[in-house]
Image: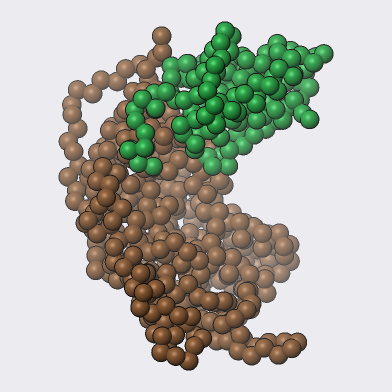
Chain colours: A green, B brown
Amino acid sequence: MTTDRRDGAMLSAMYQDVILQHYRAPQGRGVPDGRTGEALRKNPLCGDELRVGVVVRDGVIADVGFEGRGCSIAVASASMMTEAVRGATVAAARGLIVRVDGVLRGDAADFAGALADLQALAGVAAYPQRVGCARMGWGALGDALGG
Amino acid sequence: MSTTTTLAPQPVSLAPLAPRADFPLLAAQPSLHYLDSAATSQKPQAVLDAITGFYSTANANPHRGAYELSAKATDAYHDSRITIARFLGAADTDTLVFTRGTTESMNLVANAWGRTHVQEGDEIVITALEHHANFVPWQQLALAKGAHLRIAELTSDQRIDLDHLESLLTSRTRIVAITQVSNAVGSITPVAEVVRMVRAKSPAIIVLDGAQGAPHLPVEFDALGIDFYAFSGHKLLGPMGIGGVIGTRARWLECEPWQFGGDMIEWVNDHDSTWNTLPHKFEAGTPNAADAVGLAAAVRYLQQLDMTAVREHEVALLEAAHARLSALEGLHMYGPPASQRSGVISFSLADVHPHDLATILDQHGVCIRAGHHCAQPLMRRLGTNSTARASFYVYSDGSDVDALVHALTEAQRMFAHTPA
């Protein structure tokens, strides 16, 4: 890709401080003990892998975590994912997976409150080659929740 | 963490070997630093002209029509084979079989020779350096035949461990398939030494993966003493979708056809058929004549530059890049020193994932590859999922090295900046 397609503003829109913060100090590191579901997602383009584990009790995600290697976008997105869905109902988490997917495809993002960090994922939509990175953790969560 | 650079580094003053003006894509994008030639090279105007020239003056199906235009197409295809075979040092030019590229060439040898010559309990030797194209066909052949796949390990600077390779050779070794130059880290195989070893220890045939060798080193097939040499056109200034495999006539005679159809037959009866001679026996269907003509033009372009000069140019770029990159904190380079390495620098930068690097460098007009480089067995041995790779070719120059280094420091700055 050439320089004329994008500008520096788009690059900083993807690499926002909140993304870099999550990358340096990821939340939800480690697949939780006593997990009721887990799933592995691989990105065949770069060889990265993320594993997500969940503990679901009475329809609520009591704990969630991930392990594996990934780029800043993959790790930050997975980190945000664990923050966003811990304590949420499975139904709410599924709804969020769909919404995040929409944001990564370019839908307007309007997250507030505890979900505000997810706003940062909107910057990834301008980089189609990186959307797969941001999806890994969320895709693995969906798989881990099953059905 | 903040890095302060007090001394402005000297720009690398190295002119390109081939003028950028010869390459329409590079000429149109003067600020582009294309450092992914190991994936595919840019194409000179002469190649594009040759392809257009074929379609506009000689287009007909070769070997078919009894009319002058078809004869012209046949001649163009035939002449291209001679030009390319001679460029790679094969005097018996009909022993060059055209394919879509190295991947198809390896599948051809694995099927046409391997299926009939590898039996249960036999051994196939490859190395941990191989591109998937020279790995998976042998892995699958071994699985299909109940043969054993043996993998030669590497030295700490990612060269083939020749002692280990030698220890794997036995009287049951049927095939040794090995890369001439590693696409992922650039290591150059000492082919003569490997050939001596294999001939002394086993009856195996030697298949050389020249995908990264043919574009960067002078190649003399007849002097190598190997059995098959596979290569891709698009990595040596030619079009995508054309490449080939050169074999000794003796080995070709041991091969069975692997694809069936037009051109490869001599006579088709209701219930059996007989086969055409070399090279047609292994080129079923309408040949990719236009791209063969384009590849011949690419070869002539390289011959004018001279392959020894191509190699020297890359060594100069490698040394300059190595010196500049070594000065970057946290940068680790894989692979051997420049004298044993082709124009490829594979590296990692502390705290910055290769995928992030590629995106940030792209913003600076620097195209590098990030990933496993179709060499996952090698990545496992490096203990990583991916590396960043910058690769040079004849149009690369000192400004490309400068741009790479500048963009890397920018990436470092970006990731070093601690958010509040």
Work out whether B124 lies above or below A103.
Answer: below
The outermost residue toward the front is A108
- Does the rendering let one see residue B253? no
Above/below status of B330 relative to B304: above
| Residue A72 as seen in the image, left or right of residue B58 | right
Judging depth in this view, the residue of B69 and A50 nearest the camera is: B69
Residue depicted at 20% across the width and 42% down the height? B12
Residue B282 point in image, percent of width and height? 56, 77
Quadrant of res A28: top right
Residue B233 in picture, x, y percent from top left: 42, 64
Q: Is residue A36 left or right of residue A16?
A: right
Residue A44 in view in this figure: yes
Q: Residue at x 56, y 82 (%)?
A: B263
Q: Position of residue B287 (x, y in %)?
A: 50, 75
Rendered view: B176 above or below B357: below
Q: Quadrant of the N terminus of chain B?
A: top left
Q: In front here: B396 or B349? A: B396
Q: Is residue B99 left or right of residue B41?
A: right
- The residue sitting at 40% across, 63% down in the picture is B239
Q: Position of residue B176 (x, y in %)?
A: 56, 64
Q: Quadrant of the C terminus of chain B?
A: top left
**Residue B260 against residue B233 in the figure, above or below:** below
Q: Residue at x 55, y 57 (%)?
A: B133
Quadrant of residue B277 in the image? bottom right
